Image (spheres, rainbow, N blue to C red):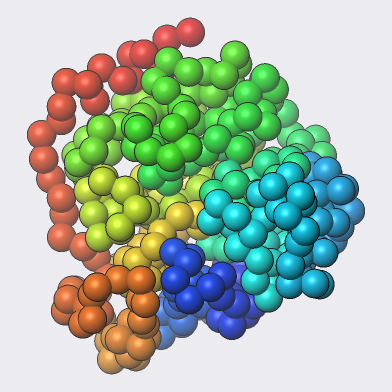
């Protein structure tokens, strides 16, 4: 059993870009790791450079012809139009770029490696994972492969029979839900913004089985998020008594993120992580969405702090400020980031009233 949390990452994310104006062409995983190191929070004995998933590992979930198409896209830097349409590669926000196979395969390798580390128990943080939209035979929502589905399958292959998956991303975790909704060994829970792409995951949508969804209105604040965690998500997970839990920690629900209309502070995410890490003997915390580089690095570094019970400094030391000051964001009109994005880790809390529709959700998802 791991005696303390471990961190899994890879240097491929430092040099890989999906295109100059793509929402994911920002430093995220590398910035998170650099910030953790700059804060003096990383003992290299618990750091792991992840492997790349093999074709055989990817084919545990994905169709062989699709895996081959992603390889072909990287090898030839192009695909014929019929294959683009069939596999949704090179269109609909899923560009063909230099590492279009290696990068997502590495994210899958990180998640599979993390699951192996957790075989006897413990906690792992792997921010490169969280590609929850990936489908068996096509790309979707910037996700070419689904590392989460592969991770759950690997846990099942270890003989576990109760695995919980909790998705904190602003977008519904549709790919994972659809892979396991009729498997009573896997509970999937997703908190996401209602009426946001992929326009699925309604409140009473259980996909015919083990799915539970909490679609929230725009403007979700810290108090509402905390209410749902404490009164819906945690009771659902604890009732299930999981042997392992995977948490997708997408941070596009933060107020500083451009891809949703939710209004959380990173403190709300950290509080959720602290609650969820206590629900199973094996806990894996992944990345996910997040499209403001400063917000992502600060949030995911704070997750590492939460997992290690580390105090959050009021002001960042010089080395950490240098990491954040060195980030850039080409798609944004923000030329100079606010001081709070480079000088502190924690956002100001975003308190607010708990709206009636939020208060009604726990009863609906807990029944049945």
Q: Is residue 152 above or below residue 34?
A: above
Q: Quarter of the image holding residue 326?
A: bottom left
Give the percent coordinates (x, y) of residue 336: 21, 82
Q: Tell whether 38 sits left or right of 68.
A: left
Give the percent coordinates (x, y) of residue 206: 52, 18
Q: Tell whether 114 sits left or right of 125.
A: right
Number of marks present in the image shown: 0
Q: Quarter of the image holding residue 103?
A: bottom right
Q: Residue at x 86, y 48 (%)?
A: 65
Residue at the far front: name it: 81
Q: Tell whether 362 sits left or right of 181.
A: left
Residue 315 visible in the picture: no
Q: Is residue 228 above or below residue 79?
A: above
Q: Residue at x 32, y 26 (%)?
A: 231
Closest to the observer, 281 or 13? 13
Q: Quarter of the image holding residue 11?
A: bottom right
Q: Residue at x 65, y 71 (%)?
A: 97
Closest to the observer, 363 or 88? 88
Q: Tell whether 16 sits left or right of 367.
A: right
Give the percent coordinates (x, y) of residue 325: 30, 86
Q: Residue at x 37, y 38 (%)?
A: 196
Residue at the far top: name it: 368
Residue 204 visible in the picture: yes
């Amino acid at each position: 059993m791991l005696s303390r949390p471990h961190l899994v990452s890879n240097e491929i994310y430092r040099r890989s870009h999906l295109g100059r104006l793509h929402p994911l062409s920002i430093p995220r995983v590398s910035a998170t790791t650099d910030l953790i190191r700059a804060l003096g929070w990383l003992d290299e004995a618990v750091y792991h450079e992840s492997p790349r998933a093999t074709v055989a590992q990817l084919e545990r979930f994905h169709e062989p012809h699709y895996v081959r198409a992603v390889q072909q896209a990287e090898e030839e830097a192009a695909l014929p139009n019929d294959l683009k349409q069939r596999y949704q590669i090179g269109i609909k926000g899923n560009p063909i770029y230099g590492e279009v196979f290696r990068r997502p395969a590495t994210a899958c390798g990180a998640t599979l490696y993390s699951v192996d580390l957790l075989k006897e128990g413990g906690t792992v943080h792997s921010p490169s994972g969280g590609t929850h939209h990936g489908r068996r035979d096509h790309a979707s929502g910037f996700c070419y492969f689904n590392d989460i589905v592969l991770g759950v399958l690997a846990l099942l292959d270890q003989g576990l029979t109760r695995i919980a998956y909790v998705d904190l991303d602003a977008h519904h975790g549709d790919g994972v839900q659809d892979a396991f909704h009729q498997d009573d060994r896997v509970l999937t829970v997703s908190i996401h913004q209602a009426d946001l792409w992929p326009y699925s995951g309604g409140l009473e949508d259980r996909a015919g089985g083990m799915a539970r969804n909490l679609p929230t209105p725009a403007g979700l604040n810290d108090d509402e998020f905390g209410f749902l965690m404490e009164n819906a998500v945690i009771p659902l997970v604890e009732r299930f008594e999981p042997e392992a839990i995977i948490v997708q920690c997408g941070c596009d629900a933060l107020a500083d993120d451009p891809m949703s209309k939710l209004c959380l502070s990173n403190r709300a995410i950290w509080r959720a992580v602290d609650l969820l890490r206590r629900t199973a003997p094996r806990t894996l915390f992944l990345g996910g969405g997040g499209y403001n580089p400063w917000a992502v690095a600060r949030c995911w570094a704070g997750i590492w702090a939460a997992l290690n019970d580390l105090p959050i400094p009021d002001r960042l030391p010089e080395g950490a400020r240098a990491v954040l000051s060195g980030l850039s964001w080409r798609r944004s009109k923000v030329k100079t980031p606010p001081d709070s994005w480079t000088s502190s880790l924690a956002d100001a809390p975003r308190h607010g009233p708990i709206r009636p529709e939020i208060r009604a959700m726990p009863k609906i998802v807990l029944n049945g």
